Amino acid sequence: MPNRDFHVVSSGVAGALFALKRAESQPDAHRLIEALGGIAGGAFGGRAPDLLDPPTSPNHRGSAHSVAAAAAVYSVSGSVLISWQEWLRSKADQLRHERELLPQDSLLRAVYAFAEFLCRLLSGIIAGLLAGYTTHLGFDALTPRSLSLV
């Protein structure tokens, strides 16, 4: 049966890979930032089912460990994820453009650069969260207890 460490590592890897796939049209530096976000989001997403539905025994399975939860995550990944990532990337590009218009010695340039970085990181984090949660459920589905329907 997969334990917490297994879920965190496998979901972190899945989060990074999914974030990279979602960012394949981005420049390499931006893909790297999104992949780092994917690792963090994936690791947290891999813990989320057990945080939402704390284990009381090796056979625990509540609503956070269900086919319905997996379907909800899949639904969000298909509709909401794309629009959120497009918005975050657009905001990051806007911040980069505005930063380039500022004087070189302006402290505000650093603020804009940090905000741009956070937008790109968050784009990867949200992809990683979804991949991590799904990965956790996928591995739990392979156990003898599997997943409940609801």
Image (cartoon, rainbow, N blue to C red):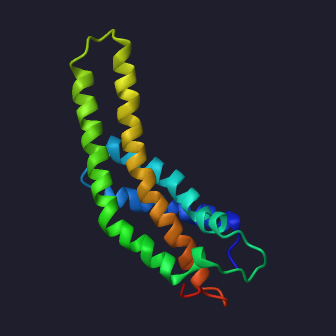
Q: How many marks?
A: 0
Q: In which quarter of the image is the N terminus?
A: bottom right
Is 57 placed left or right of 70 in the picture? right
Q: Where 92 sits versus 71, above or below?
A: above
Choose top left, top right, bottom left or bottom right for residue 54.
Answer: bottom right
Is 78 placed left or right of 3 in the picture? left
Residue found at x 63% / y 66%? 52
Between 134 and 75, the residue placed more toward the observer is: 75
Between 106 and 17, the residue placed more toward the observer is: 106
Residue found at x 61% / y 87%? 146
Q: Where 94 sits versus 83, above or below?
A: above
Q: Where 112 sits versus 140, above or below?
A: above
Coordinates of residue 86 in the picture (x, y in percent)? 26, 51
Coordinates of residue 60 in the picture (x, y in percent)? 71, 80
Is 59 placed left or right of 19 in the picture? right
Between 6 and 87, the residue placed more toward the observer is: 87
Coordinates of residue 113 in the picture (x, y in percent)? 36, 27
Residue found at x 39% / y 23%? 111
Q: In which quarter of the image is the C terminus?
A: bottom right
Residue found at x 48% / y 59%? 129
